[in-house]
Amino acid sequence: MQNEDAADAIVVLPADYAPDWMERAGRKLKMEYIGMGSVFTVIFKTAFVHLPRASQSAIATIGTLFLFMGLKKKTRDHISCSLLLFIAAALAGPGVTNGLWFVPYVLFGACVWAMEGYLEKRRTRIYSLPLVLGGFAATGSGWVLGLAFVAAYLLEPRPLLPGLRKRLALLVAASAIVAAVVAAYVGSRGNGLRVPALSPPAGALFVLYAVIAVITVLCLAFYWSRLAWPHRVNAILFGVLGAFDARIVALFGLASMIVWSATIFRHGIDSDRLRPYTKHAEWYFFPLVFAAAIWVVTR
């Protein structure tokens, strides 16, 4: 299997690629920053707007920011990454809102940020795992899902980096101990050890979950040999568990978008012929999403 560090490889566009007037103007105006700020504004005002407090909506939105930081080295263009963020947020909205799962969601997003960094030459991120999983354990029994997600990255061999997987194993073990201690302490005070009642996805969420699951299965089938082991395992694990609870559907949204970014949307889109078009398109996307952000804020 190709080492996942190849996500940092330089992507060369065709020799005849030339920025058009929109791209030239967008670069001068720094529209990529305005555009991505607008993406998170739209998510804040749509997917998580029904949380009781704006601060809770902001915390949940930070979960998609962590996903963005975990995906951007694979997708390579903002329009593809924004699509993945919108899909993940749509899957997360009902479970995070109805279950008041905004803190576990952002902490699971932090796990995505840390572990994708582990695969992509940002390996110091894994030192945050004891803090992240310890905080996750303080929120309830869902921390075991975060631990399972993180532990799956131990399945990926790192022959070119001797000692790295051992370092990760030590940090995962330390994180598990910290989380177990925190969970026991919280449980001793009458909180945290009770397993919450399950709430399977229904209605529009179930339809969206089923569609995303089918596409993810196709990505796994056609790109299996190109995927890292944790990407395979986590997509399957959370895809299956998502059928039992809407909060796990939110986590499946994060795991499945990792798979999409590593397959059909790798380097923007997995087509050398079409990639220049998506590169041009992102500069037209930025003003559109900016207008959408203004609309959702002022409506």
Image (tube, grey):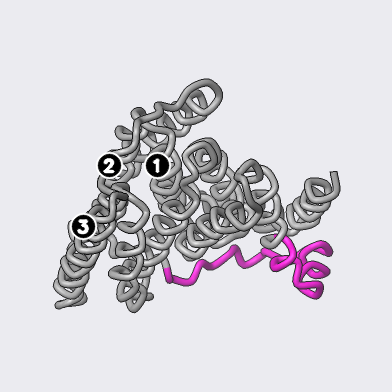
At a point 48% along the width and 57% down the height, the residue shown is 67
Front position in the image: 184 or 5: 184
Q: Amino acid at mark 3?
A: Ala
Q: Amino acid at mark 1?
A: Phe
Q: Residue 172 is drawn in which quadrant?
A: bottom left
Q: Are marks 1 and 3 in contact (CB under 8 Å)?
A: no
At a point 38% along the width and 75% down the height, the residue shown is 122
Q: Is residue 39 above or below residue 247?
A: below
Q: Which residue is mark 2?
A: 194
Front position in the image: 254 or 102: 102
Front position in the image: 215 or 151: 151
Q: Which mark is residue 252?
A: 1
Which mark's residue is nearer the viewer, 1 or 3?
Answer: 3
Quadrant of the frame with the N terminus: bottom left
Q: Helix or strand or loop: what does disc 2 sit on?
A: loop
Residue 23: x %, y % from top left:
77, 65
Q: Residue 97 is drawn in which quadrant?
A: top right
Q: Is residue 41 magenta?
A: no
Q: Earlier in the sequence, mark 1 or mark 2?
A: 2
Q: Is residue 198 above or below residue 178?
A: above
Label 2 Cα crowd, 10 Å radius (few <14 / some 14-19 / many 20+): few
Q: Is residue 276 left or right of residue 59?
A: right
Q: Helix or strand or loop: what does disc 3 sit on?
A: helix
Residue 230: x %, y % from top left:
27, 53
Residue 168 visible in rendering: yes
Q: Which residue is mark 3?
A: 184
Q: Amino acid at mark 2?
A: Arg
Highlighted magenta segment, given as a residue range:
8-35
Give the CA distance from mark 1 to mark 2.
22 Å
